[in-house]
Amino acid sequence: MATILIVEDEPAVGDLLRQVFTRQGYRVITANGGREALELFQQDRPQTTLLDLHMPGMDGITVLKKIRAIDPQAAVMVLTGLLTDDLENQARELGVTDFLLKGDLSLDVLVGAVGRLRQQQSATLPETSVPFTDALAETAKEVLILVVDDEPQIRDILTQYLTLQGFRVRTARNGPETLQSVEQERPELIILDIYMPGMNGVEVLRQLRDKKNYMGGVIMLTASQDQALLKKAWALGSINVLGKPVDLARLSLVIHTALTFIGR
């Protein structure tokens, strides 16, 4: 089984990539910083490393230099949201295998790029993906989840993650879009950011409940612990509150509980 090391300081992105490549049959190890990445690289000697260039503490170029000192031939693919000419030149001089830009990257493209690299390394990949055994699999295809968040990256991560789980997913950027989306098609579950410009999540939920447009399950997302606001959310019938950055494994558990609660 081929090993991939994913070096990514954003937990949600790292968790998503771990699950994607695990399902493709890879053994996946993750690091959220440079020092941890080097320790894991030295210990596990992965066949492929996906390396974020922009990280606090030890940056990706420094990590790449140290990887080259350990193994001059190691396959390293750069995964970054911002690539300047200077960074690209430094990385190319250090022999990176490929550059993948987060903003333009789909999971299919990423998986394909890693797969082609493995073929070039003359390694044998598993013939089939690891079977999907999540407890949500049986009901996921019948469930529509509405993801509401004003941050594009969070919407994208949650959409890709939930789609991989088999759910139908729609998204909204703000309160008015949420109300309109619920009018068009009522979801079984809403993942709703509390803090959004204009109309916050609690006000969105209040309007949905007052109009009786939506009486289903709601998972609230929040980056802070405003107890007064959280109490209002609970009073309006939210099923759970999750902090940001979102722990995707925890989210799966909460979704499963929520769907059980609403009888799915």
Image (cartoon, rainbow, N blue to C red):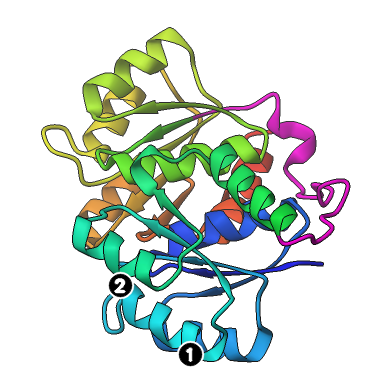
Q: Which residue is mark 2?
A: 55
Secondary element type, mark 2: loop
Q: Measuring 25% from the left and 64% from the top, which residue is drawn there?
A: 87
Can see residue 117? yes
Q: Is residue 68 left or right of residue 172?
A: right
Density class for disc 2 (Cα within 10 Å; few <14, some 14-19, many ≥20) is some
Secondary element type, mark 1: helix
Where is residue 169 drawn, in percent x and y?
A: 52, 28
Frontmost of labels 2 and 1 is 1
Res 115 label: none
Q: Measuring 74% from the left and 51% from the top, which residue is drawn there?
A: 24
Residue farthest toward the left in the current orientation of the protein: 198
Can see residue 238? no
Q: Is residue 86 left or right of residue 205?
A: left
141 is within the stretch colored magenta: yes
Q: Is residue 207 left or right of residue 8?
A: left
Cα distance in 3D space between marks 2 and 1 = 20 Å
Query: What is the magenta segment's predominant secondary structure?
Result: loop
- Observer-nearest residue: 71 or 56? 71
Q: Which residues are magenta?
A: 121-145
Q: Measuring 34% from the left and 42% from the top, which residue is drawn there?
A: 103
Where is residue 148 drawn, in percent x and y?
A: 35, 34
Q: Measuring 65% from the left and 47% from the top, which residue is drawn there?
A: 256
237 is within the stretch colored magenta: no
Q: Which residue is mark 1?
A: 69
Residue farthest toward the right in the current orientation of the protein: 127
- The amino acid beneath tag 2 is Met
- Observer-nearest residue: 127 or 123? 123
113 is higher (above) or lower (below) than 216: below
